Image: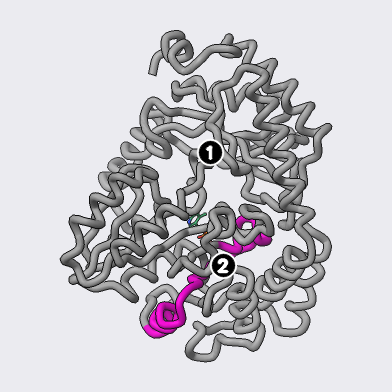
Amino acid sequence: MAYSEQVREAFRAELEGIREKGLYKEERLIHSPQSADIRVEYPEGAEVREVINLCSNNYLGLSSHPEVIRAAHEGLDARGYGMSSVRFICGTQDIHRKLEHALSEFLDTEDTILFPSCMDANAGVFEAILGPEDVMISDRLVHASIIDGIRLCKAMHDTYKHANMKHLEQKLEEHQDKRLRMIITDGVFSMDGDLAPLDEIVALAQKYDAMVFVDDSHASGFIGKTGRGTPEHFGVMGKIDIITTTLGKGLGGASGGCVAGRQEIVDLCRQRARPYLFSNSVAPPIISASLKVLEILSATTERRDRLEENARFWRQGLSEAGFVIKAGDSPIVPIMLFNAKLAQDFARDLYEQGIYVTGFFFPVVPAGQARIRTQLSADHDIPMLESALVKFKAIGDKHGILGLDKKAIIAKFGL
Ligand SMILES: *Cc1c(COP(=O)(O)O)cnc(C)c1O
């Protein structure tokens, strides 16, 4: 250990500062496969208990699906454990291209390029295609990985107010002198569960000669009639220039991401995107399992339909119980509590009742907008959600918030 006590003290003080602000993130140890009901040890050393999981991104319940697991085993047996190479040296198998083709077909794009994660896709894509004479115009609530990708790119950056089309139009007008304009948005916003109005965005892009970039990580596989994502929901499939998404949420939940879109964009990424060029190939078992996921989703919409039903039931149940929830069409259902401490207490009380949820507060969401974000899965069933609802009501009652609106909750608990 080389660093001095003085340096150690400085780091410790920083950690203490995070704790004092109530921002220290604790991890809970799961002793079972990812699922709607899991066995959890929390805090570390405590007895392992069964809880209903309402905070995973396992939207389609495919993370531990027997057919997906079997496909991963088959991939492992047929193509090995790892590639020990980046794609362009000796890390591309036939199945990597097969998955890229399958994703292009699924997302209705000209081609697709895989990345180790969607974080990496977003980190690499802007720098690969835009330069100092271009402008990136992003929604103010885009995901952290997009913000990092924007930082790495030399193009000019501007933002528009969340989902505000008037403001976006104004920005597009302002930037008519740039070589290229790119509108950048999430398809589904992860903290609020609302959808970007892609039909209006595409219309503005056509009017002002701009490209459209959509990160559909919280939509691929389940938003839209056949689960193709927000472009399908808004009737603009094939009109989005660049879609990035993850294999780590609805589409199996392991890891991997991609950039799908116009041929030239994908080709430029293959030549220039740094996380693609300098990070390892996605492992064969994940590729093989992801192919199975797309096969399952292309054969039947049963899982996305069940997810939609579960989300509808859950939203309605929470509303009727008197909670303030964010309206939306996604399986992300935030229960607004506004006060950070209340959100933390609420999550802790629910855990005691066998419900696993997480409280979100600043800086993950804006100050004064603390919440419990619940996420539905096709793996939940109605009896399970009914029993969860009983517990939410009990804890809501305990804190005296049922039936209170935003103003009343803030008056009672402060911000
Ligand atoms: C989760 C998420 C990512 C990151 O995906 P990984 O594949 O886990 O890196 C990127 N963008 C959005 C919008 C996300 O929700």
Residue 251 among magenta residues: yes
Q: Residues under labels 1 and 2: Cα distance?
A: 25 Å
88 sits left or right of 30 in the view: left
Amino acid type at mark 2: Gly
113 sits left or right of 16 in the view: right
Task: Point out the stretch of residues depicted in magenta.
Answer: 246-271
The local secondary structure at tag 1 comes to loop
**Vertically, is 122 above or below 385?**
below
Which disc, if any, is residue 108? Answer: none
Question: Which image quarter: residue 398?
Answer: top right
Q: Residue at x 64, y 62 (%)?
A: 254
Give percent across and percent down for residue 300. Answer: 79, 61
Which residue is tagged 1? Answer: 26
Question: Which image quarter: residue 44?
Answer: top right
**Residue 212 visible in the shown view:** yes
Which residue is tagged 2? Answer: 256
Q: Is mark 2 within 8 Å of ligand 1?
A: yes
The local secondary structure at tag 2 comes to loop
Q: Residue at x 68, y 38 (%)?
A: 311
Residue 61 among magenta residues: no
Q: Residue at x 83, y 32 (%)?
A: 383
Q: Nearer the viewer, residue 223 or 189?
A: 223
